[in-house]
Image (cartoon, grey):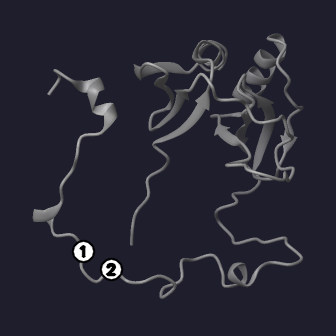
Amino acid sequence: MINYSGINHIALVTSDMDATLCFWRDLLGMRLVAGIGKQGNRQYFLDLSDNVLIAFFEWPEAEPVPDKDPGRPVKGPIIFDHVCIELDNADDLWELKDRLSAAGIWVTEVLDNGFIYSIFSTDPNGIQLEFCCRTDKFDVRNKFRIKDPAPSDITQEGPGPLQGKWPEVISPTPESERKIYPGELKKLFENEE
């Protein structure tokens, strides 16, 4: 069984790195920790927490998607609906709501979603953002719950991974054949090894 430890980073896209940094670093308070670039293409990383980064590619000809409310269905190409960033507590959530409001940035009221309290906003790139903190009432992870009048057959099979749905690995890569190739971001660490 594979053990996952979290999301290392989410890579998003901007056409204006300066506006993006002003929002994510200066308003939201995330620290810029790394960046790499070449003509017409940059990638910068912001520190979200001890083990999660937010990355932005700057592609000058990228265009933001049309504005939409989180959770509302759309037609046509789309990659994701929104990013939800968890805060430590309700005081941090209210502080962020006040900070966004003071900056003249649209933000919802605080919503009670049972297991989290949430606010929604939008970054300068049109990326829908949810900020949340956990409540003491419920933990969505501790009991399988589906409130869907027409769940799919796959959903009705239950919460756990089912064996036999995919081919089993017959010949795992031996340690002696495991090769690791240099990636683009390794340049950040030149002369440090």
The percent coordinates of residue 160 (x first, y second) are 57, 77
Q: Is residue 35 visible?
A: no
Asked if the residues shown at circle 1 and circle 2 are in contact, with their CB atoms under 8 angstroms apart, the answer is yes
**Residue at which label 2 appears:** 169
- Determine whether, in the image, residue 74 is placed left or right of residue 93: right
The kind of secondary structure element at disc 2 is: loop
Q: Return the residue nearer the eye: 173 or 148.
A: 173
**Where residue 16 appears, x then y in whole percent?**
62, 18
Disc 1 crowd rating (10 Å Cα; few below 14, some 14-19, many 20+) is: few
53 relative position to 189: left or right: right
In the image, residue 21 lies at what x, y percent?
A: 59, 16
Amino acid marked by disc 2: Val
Query: Residue, x 85% and y 39% (percent of image)?
Result: 68
Query: Can you give x and y, in whole percent of width and height, for residue 153 in the image?
Result: 73, 85
Residue at 65 percent across and 14 percent down: it is: 19
From the image, tell me which residue sits under label 1: 172
Task: Give the position of the C terminus as an image quadrant.
Answer: top left
Q: Is residue 81 left or right of residue 53?
A: right
The residue lying at 70 percent from left, 29 percent from top is: 63
- Name the foreground residue: 163 vs 56: 56
Q: Residues within 10 Å of mark 2 (few under 14, many from 20)?
A: few
In what element is the residue under mark 1?
Answer: loop
Quarter of the image with the N terminus in it: bottom left
Amino acid at dot 1? Pro
